[in-house]
Image (cartoon, rainbow, N blue to C red):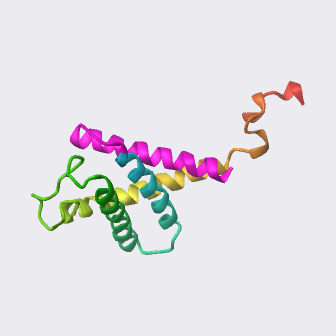
């Protein structure tokens, strides 16, 4: 069950990251799905920490920037996926300060979304997850 839950959260994060890229740049790359899923799971872990909001936001931006750097060094060596070389305060054209600052508020939103989704999963009774009409409260009483 834990693997299924983490896989679903990875899929949501990957899809969300690709969706943001499509809205922002009108294109994306398969590696961004992997980066987004990884970021979402890492941000979910970070969301459980008792930290002041500004610290949590900065840490979230650091997580996303770190994953972006790793993804860039693995999949973007020729700058065909993205190219930040013309942006200020960039490192090897893979990450830059303007996007790191953008990730700070977005990471808080992603952490909140993670907690909401995680909370919804706790409300579904495990023993009734795949047992027909019993999924809804009160449904299927005639079968009891």
Residue 121 place in picture, x, y as percent: 63, 48
Q: Residue at x 47, y 51 (%)?
A: 113
- Compared to residue 142, the image places residue 63 above or below, namely below
The number of numbered discs placed on residues in the rendered structure image is 0
The image quarter containing residue 18 is top left
Picture residue at 17% right of the left edge, 53% below the top: 83
Q: Is residue 32 magenta?
A: no
- Judged by its main secondary structure, the magenta piece is helix
Q: Residue at x 26, y 63 (%)?
A: 100
Comparing 99 with 76, the one in front is 76
* The residue stretch that appears in magenta: 1-30
Q: Is residue 142 left or right of residue 103?
A: right
Residue under the point 24% across and 43% down:
24
Q: Nearer the viewer, residue 84 or 51?
A: 84
Q: Quadrant of residue 129?
A: top right
Q: Vertically, is 142 above or below 45?
A: above
Q: Is residue 97 left or right of residue 74?
A: left
**In the figure, is residue 96 to the left or right of 1?**
left
In the rendered image, residue 23 lying in the magenta stretch gets the answer: yes
Q: Position of residue 120 (x, y in %)?
A: 60, 47
Image position of 56 with respect to 15: above or below: below
Q: Quadrant of the C terminus?
A: top right
| Outermost residue, right side | 144
Q: Residue furthest left?
A: 86
Residue 114 percent across, percent down from the top left: 50, 54
Image spot of residue 48 (x, y percent): 53, 67
């Amino acid at each position: 069950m834990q693997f299924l839950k983490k896989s679903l959260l990875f899929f949501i994060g990957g899809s969300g990251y690709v969706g943001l890229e499509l809205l922002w740049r009108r294109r994306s790359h398969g590696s961004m799905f992997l980066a987004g899923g990884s970021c979402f799971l890492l941000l979910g872990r970070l969301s459980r920490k008792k930290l002041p909001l500004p610290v949590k936001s900065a840490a979230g931006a650091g997580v996303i920037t770190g994953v972006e750097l790793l993804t860039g060094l693995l999949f973007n060596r020729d700058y065909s996926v993205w190219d930040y070389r013309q942006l200020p305060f960039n490192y090897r054209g893979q990450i830059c300060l303007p996007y790191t600052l953008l990730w700070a508020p977005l990471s808080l939103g992603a952490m909140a979304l993670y907690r909401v989704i995680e909370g919804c999963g706790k409300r579904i009774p495990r023993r009734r997850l795949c047992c027909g009409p019993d999924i809804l409260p009160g449904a299927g009483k005639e079968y009891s």
